[in-house]
Every structure is written in C-alpha cells, then in structure tokens.
Image: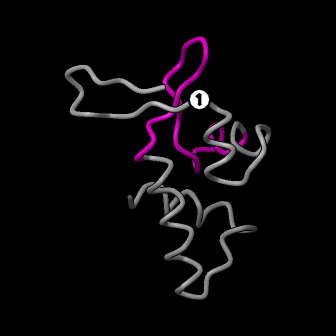
Amino acid sequence: MSDSGSSGGVRLIPLSEVMHKTGRKKTFIYEGVKEGWFPKPIQGRPNLWVESEIDAYNLALVRARDMGQNVGTDRPMMVQLVKNQ
C-alpha cells in the first residue's frame, strides 16, 4: 500500500507491515503510540504509518544499541530517541 500522489513518494504501510518491520506486536505498537515513543499512525480505516518514520525508529534502536544503551526497558530513552529523529 503506498501513496504516490504529491507527497513526494511517501509510502504508507499498514499495521501488519509495521509489525513485520519492527518485530513487535500490535499491543506494543499502540502502547508506544499512546506513550509517545513510537511513531503515530495516520488515523483511518485502516490506520497507516509513514514507512520512513518506522525505518527511523528502527535505526534509532540500532544506534542506541551501538552506544551501549538498553532501550528495550527504558521508556523515557525511547521517547527521546524518537524525538531526535
């Protein structure tokens, strides 16, 4: 699923693809959205995410890991990683 209109090639992806790209389950994703440490979807039926934002989230996790940080259990750090992208 993608949007090829005037949005400069932004690709929108459904929850199933977000789950595949992140290796996370639906509950984790929506908890992160609610708490502010996971990219927000574009509301609709179905909700869609901007693929580049999901890729940036994954990259932030890799960078944090490479700096020796355990972001898996540190919610405030995850918020900061997402905001710094």
Start-end of magenta stretch: 31-52
Q: Is residue 6 magenta?
A: no
Relative to residue 3, is residue 11 depicted above or below?
below
Question: Is 26 left, or right, of 60 in this rendering?
Answer: right
Above or below: residue 55 compared with residue 5: below
**How was the colour assigned to the protein in this rendering?**
one colour
Q: Is residue 25 left or right of residue 18?
A: right
Q: Is residue 8 above or below residue 31?
A: above
Which residue matches tag 1?
A: 14
Question: Under tag 1, what secondary structure?
Answer: strand
Whole-percent x and y of residue 16?
68, 34
In the image, what residue occupies the spot 54% across and 73% down?
62
In this picture, residue 73 sits left or right of residue 63 = right
Where, by quadrant of the figure, is residue 47 drawn?
Answer: top right
Q: How many marks?
A: 1
Whole-percent x, y for residue 17 in the image: 62, 39
Asked whether residue 33 is drawn in magenta, I would say: yes
User: Dot 1: few (<14), some (14–19), or many (≥20) neighbours within 10 Å?
Assistant: some
